[in-house]
Image (cartoon, coloured by chain):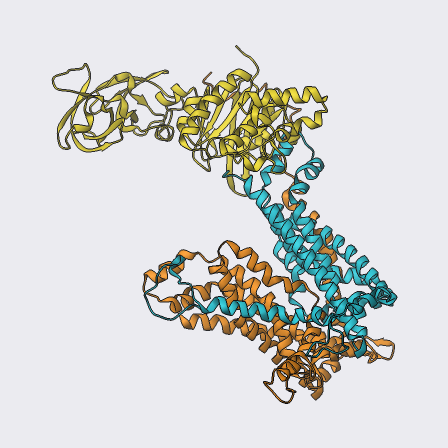
Amino acid sequence: MSASVTGAKFSGGRHGIRKSRWLPIYVTVYLGFLYLPILLLPLFSFNNAASTTFPLAGFTTKWYAALWGNSAMLDAARNSLFVGVCVSILSTGLAICAARAITRYPFRGQRAATGLIMAPLFLPEIIVAVSLLMIVLQIGLELSLATVIFGQTVFCLPYAMSVLISGFEGFDQSLEEASMDLGETALGTFRRVTLPVVAPAIVSSLLVSFTISLDEFILAFFLSGTEPTLPVYIWGQLRFAAKLPSVLALGSLMLVLSILLITIAEVLRHRAERRIQGSSFNG
Amino acid sequence: MAEKPMIQIDAVSRFYGIYKALDSVSLDIAAGEFFSLLGPSGCGKTTLLRSIAGFDTPTSGDIRIDGQSAIGLPPNKRPTNMVFQNYAIFPHLNVAENVAYGLKRLRLDATEERRRIGDALEQVRLSTLGTRKANELSGGQRQRVALARALVMRPKVLLLDEPLSALDKKLREEMQVELRSLQKAVGITFVLVTHDQYEALAMSDRIAVMFGGRIAQVATPKEIYQRPLTRQVADFLGGMNFMKAKITGESAADISVETKRFGVVTLPKPLGFTHREGEATIGIRPERLRVLWDDATAAHAIEGQVVDRHYFGEITHLIVDVPGLEAPLSVSETNNFGADDIPVGAPIRLAYDPDALVALAD
Amino acid sequence: MVAVSTMAEGPSKSAPRAGRRWIDSDEATGLTLISPTLLYALALLFLPVLIVIAYSFWTQDYLTIDRTFTLENYRVALTEPIYRDLLARSLIIALVVSVVTVVFSYPVAWFISFHGGVHKNLWLFLITVPCWTSYLLRVMSWKVVLGYQGVLNTGLMSTGIIDTPVTSLLYNSNAVVITLVHSWAAFAILPIFVSLEKIDRSLIEAAHDLGDNKIMSFLRVTLPLSLPGVISAFLIVMIPTVGDYVTPKLVGGKDGVMIATAIQAQFGKGANWPLGAALSVTTMVIVSAMAGLVVLALKLFVRWIR
């Protein structure tokens, strides 16, 4: 909503748009709406009660302590880590090829190809999950962490692609030409120039894919066999009301980890952008 | 001196679909020459340069560098090095590392490598900036790093793609002088692409003027300026007054024309001369028309009336109507003697030297 | 040396003719590079969807699949009351959620784009951080908030604002809507923001110069130019929402069940893959049609304002 309605006279501000008092308040409330429910999880994970009601019943870390002895949870955590690493490497690897093709070597049918790869963003996850389930079982494969990895990669690809496309787009073609001109081979150019300059985008993509995989539930739910990932494990625990606080503790840890990884990815991306900006044409 | 040329461009064409970026271009560039490709944007000069470097493959024709055909050779195997228009300084390396980039593959021993880098930086006067990071350099400094990086490879040919276009005027003029003396000091062939006529005139041994994928004229700067071959070339470098004249005689080397106000003159016949209906186009540069003050006389003079005047600091442009000429003359006169005070509408007498007249080929 | 051209010693036999083969071209390299990714997407996205569509025309008898073509599954999907109800409710919820989310997100995107100043990236980052947390955890947090003994109720009761707990906010469609709006709120901001950033500010200044006040210039210049972003936001929210599984299961109760539950049932104990496939295809087709209508409506609305 634009700012106040007082007719044709506007004073100051850029573009003649006067700053409104209400809008910043609205945005702050909006941010509160976004964050508060999530912050409740850590809040109650330190609460010394088995249910999530006010008033609070005293501070405790016992729910967290209990996690370390929970072997089922630790197994699930290990699975999530394994899956996350595989998914991030696979998505990023595939996305690097595709992003480079799109930004550097235009070809016919490019938009259709990009559309296909980005499609999971616009599809209900359950349909993706169900269709993958069908094809896996048709082939006769067993459901396992491998099927989860392949399924989640399909879902992470669009995100990895976005990160890498903007990374490659900001990368000047003449840098590679200069390297070739100075005697370097194509492979050498990739190793000495392309990779270092695009590295922050690659790391960002790895972190983003890992985080998405870590948090992803539906595909893991449909495609995992006997070894659950953390979200699947949490889902299983939700029927037991008594387990709620430890689930909250686990959830809080996952929240912190996700936010940490994403922050690192963003800082890296920002620094890389500044480095590239600084050394471009208009010094 | 029938020395083999360093670069031979042999009927090179480059098509993009039906669009002709280069149309059967042929050219020879001698070793040790400072050669410029001059023309407006889209004329094909950059395409040609990139073809020499290896970043563009011609659709047909051959390019020979130092006697060897370069077609099919990738850029990293050619004895050429390029200074890119935006300098292409590697952002993740500092100055010394940038300059050392191409040397790494040669696996020189450390002292030799350092010596060569030091020499290269000294040549471009950047010796103190070895450890500076790429994103802390000014435009002029970046350009020198790009130069040093290319020269340290000791190529047979240095290619420069509009290297000065990003610099401001003063810096550009300084760099023009520096590039020229650098080329003389190093002694290798320079091929420079520019759209700036004064740049080409100031630095080159020879210039090739290009329009629409074709070469219009190849000659020394003086020759190109004083004896342009075509109207396009004449117009592109400086101003030119054009007029029609009737052809009264023609031989192998000369043509005689009867001009409307400049008398009957015999002029050298330009290469590829064509005439329509017995008429030729003659030209004279604005600065070759001299104002005759007060009672001064001259062997060749014409009379007219000033219809407009523009002041440019050092010089004044006068637009003079001369009865009998189809278009007013443009006159460029230094302001030393008060040309800027000549009132509009005043009668004026202009002296000229018949040698200043030029016959154009088209 | 004023020579314009010199021929070398006759046409040289050894000089290779210049020419370009397609295989060396940029296009070929591009296709080669993208092929692994493309094949992956084809095999694991396109192909499975085709199989789903194929299955929707077959029937399943315990463990055996009968591949005779039949429209029976679609008949069931479209005429059985239970499925029609679920489908209708899912579509309505998807529509409501996307409208609410886009309407509430737009001002935030506008604020960051036009008043974000040097801290734009920081604002954007803060807004999108919740996107990267686990969807499951976010839904759980709403369960915590909206329950009978949940945060909202016990909080309001302990401060004396209400005496009896509010029951209308959990285990029904309202809870589903609120939870989904919260989930998508940050996602919808991004496409709208990107669209707004692309708008040339001098266009808005020109509108003011020609007499528009701020509301009018917004409706006639900013809004139409940001339409691609708005449409993107709608689609990103509406289509995945229609097939949402977790939220209805956790906070929907009996009243808030959505079509995804029915689809999932066919692949579990229910073991009727063809029906599950038919339900999936039907859902996708109808929601795409609805999306198309929404896009059309938006475009007409924008044109009408002019």
- Which residue is outermost to the front? A58
Q: Would you identify the image quadrant in which residue C138 lies?
A: bottom right
Name the foreground residue: A11 vs C274. A11
Q: Would you identify the image quadrant in which residue A40 lies?
A: bottom right
Q: Which chain is cyan?
A: A
**Residue A240, position in %: x, y?**
81, 78
Name the residue located 46 percent from the left edge and 25 percent from the top edge.
B175
Name the residue located 83 percent from the left edge and 60 percent from the top edge.
A78
Indicate the colour of chain B: yellow
Q: Which chain is orange?
A: C
Classify the position of the C terminus of chain C by image quarter: bottom left
**Residue B31, position in %: x, y?**
55, 17
Query: Can see residue A219?
Result: no
Q: How many marks?
A: 0
Name the foreground residue: C51 vs C96. C96
Q: Is residue C89 left or right of residue C61?
A: left
Q: Is residue A104 left or right of residue C110?
A: right
**Residue A109, position in %: x, y?**
63, 54
Give the answer, above or below, for where C136 lies relative to B112. below
Q: Is residue C33 left or right of residue A145?
A: left
Name the foreground residue: C48 vs B323. C48
Give the answer, above or below, for where C17 lies relative to A210. above
Q: Is residue A134 left or right of residue C214?
A: right
**Residue B91, position in %: x, y?**
60, 38
Give the answer, above or below, for where C287 lies relative to C197. below
Query: Can see residue C236?
Result: yes
